[in-house]
Amino acid sequence: MAQLTIVANIVANEDKIELVKAELLKLIDITRAEDGCINYDLHQDNTNPAHFMFYENWETRELWQTHMSNTHLAEYMAATDGAVASFTLNEMTKIG
């Protein structure tokens, strides 16, 4: 199966930017150590500090799905409940 690329966009509420940022940063090391994680890179928009983006590559969709059911993501969701204005996730395949 082809490698899976994930682009996840998270927009924090204006008064919760630092909370969301801190919680997102907690995900990096633990996720990078997971089976199948090729890269897991967090970005913050230069003009809109409330906008964060994860660029991720996984060996397979199944390994990414295992990641999505891990405890640390549930803990992130609980810690940021009500602090995120929007979240979009795109599953992508590299074509060139």
Image (cartoon, rainbow, N blue to C red):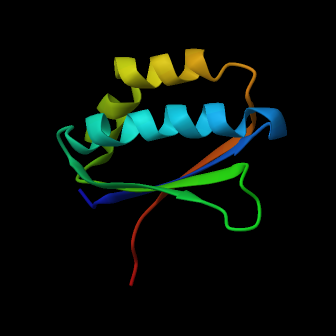
> What residue appears at the point 23 percent right and 53 percent down from the top-left corner?
59
- Say if 41 sits above or below 10 in the image: below
Note whether residue 62 is visible.
Answer: no
Percent coordinates x, y for residue 79 in the rendering:
58, 18
> What residue appears at the point 53 percent right and 35 percent down from the top-left corner?
22
User: Could you say which is closer to the camera, residue 19 or residue 7?
Assistant: 19
Quarter occupied by the C terminus: bottom left
Quarter occupied by the N terminus: bottom left
Q: Is residue 39 left or right of residue 92?
A: left
Percent coordinates x, y for residue 95 in the rendering:
40, 78
Can you tell which quarter of the image residue 46 is in?
Answer: bottom right
- Say if 51 sits above or below 82 in the image: below
- Say if 9 sits above or below 79 in the image: below
Q: How many marks?
A: 0
> What residue appears at the point 57 percent right and 15 percent down from the top-left corner?
78
Q: Is residue 75 left or right of residue 20?
A: left
Percent coordinates x, y for residue 25 in the rendering:
45, 40
